[in-house]
Image (cartoon, rainbow, N blue to C red):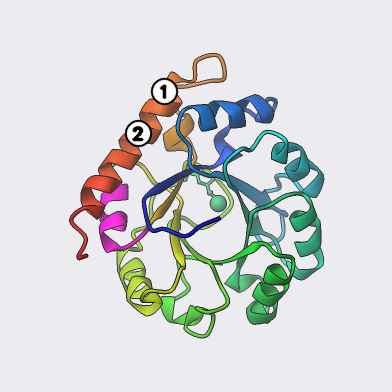
Amino acid sequence: MSFDRSIKIAPSILSADFADFGREIQAIEAEGADWVHVDVMDGHFVPNLTFGPPAVAAFRKHVKTVMDVHLMIAPVDPYIEAFANAGADIITAHLEAGPHIHRTLQAIRATGKKAGVALNPGTPAEAVAHLLDLTDLICVMTVNPGFGGQKFIDMTGKVRTLRSMIGDRPVHIEIDGGVDPSTAPKLALAGADVLVAGSAVFRGGSVANPAPYGENIRAIRMAAEKAAGARAA
Ligand code: DX5
Ligand code: ZN
């Protein structure tokens, strides 16, 4: 994976048809998805339960782009190897999932995968000040994690702070939760480059009628790119 800060759209399959993940993944990639965002939830760290390493390994067979695995689980460390073996390209752990995020990121990188750290809305940007050389991606949650389709919580200020903290390090700023064409511009302007979207991508479409997926992806991308174009160089 080479690094660049161009806008990337990462649909979350949490909003896909749970009876048809393979064809849903093929459909969103055919309709322009840059990454595929996979939301792993354990019913402990967040009040919802989704899927584990065997399911992620099955998704891998269909993902041709980048499989961006978001671990909303605690503890994280005992499962890192299993998700790496399942084929994740990026493994993102929540800073709040345990006392040793520094060690967790080291462990993810030791598997050869890209390491991400996710921040819940209540966690300040400064919390990652000592992790910037250990991480490849900072995921800024703009909802409290656990469900798709929730109301957007504005974290534009946090994104701006992170952008200045990162400097020219090859670290992505990913936004996750409530992203759509109306919320994407201010986040892109503030410095975000990866936009996760579940309900805003899957709404109105289906495996049998995937065209809305492409329209929705393009709408978010265009809104973000227009704003990002106004970013200070
Ligand atoms: C929430 C997940 C998000 C969610 C995004 O805990 O981490 O990735 O699926 O869904 P929308 O875009 O519908 O808010
Ligand atoms: Zn997510």
For badge 1, the amino acid type reads Pro
From the Cβ of disc 2, is ligand 1 less than 8 Å away?
A: no
Which span is picked out in magenta?
A: 183-192
Tag 1: Cα neighbours inside 10 Å, few (<14), some, or many (≥20)?
Answer: some
Secondary structure mostly seen in the magenta stretch: helix
Q: Which residue is mark 1?
A: 212
Q: SS of the residue at dot 2?
A: helix
Q: Does residue 178 belong to the magenta stretch?
A: no
Point out the image quarter for the C terminus: bottom left
C-beta proximity under 8 Å, tags 1 and 2: no
Q: In the image shown, does 20 or 58 lie closer to the viewer?
A: 58
- The answer to which quarter of the image holds residue 212 is top left
Point out the image quarter for the N terminus: bottom right
The answer to whether 103 is drawn above or below residue 146 in the figure is below
Query: Which percent across, then down, holds residue 32?
Result: 45, 33
Precedes in sequence: disc 1 or disc 2: 1
Left or right: 121 in relation to 18: left
Q: In the image shown, does 46 or 156 lie closer to the viewer?
A: 156
Left or right: 73 in relation to 185: right
Q: Residue at x 78, y 49 (%)?
A: 53
Residue 102 visible within the image: yes
The answer to whether 125 is drawn above or below residue 111 in the figure is below
Query: Which percent across, then down, holds residue 227?
Result: 22, 51
Residue 75 visible within the image: no
Query: Which percent across, then down, holds residue 91?
Result: 64, 59
Q: SS of the residue at dot 1?
A: helix
Q: In the image shown, does 158 or 144 lie closer to the viewer?
A: 158
Q: Nearer the viewer, mark 1 or mark 2?
A: 2
For badge 2, the amino acid type reads Arg
Q: Which residue is mark 2?
A: 218
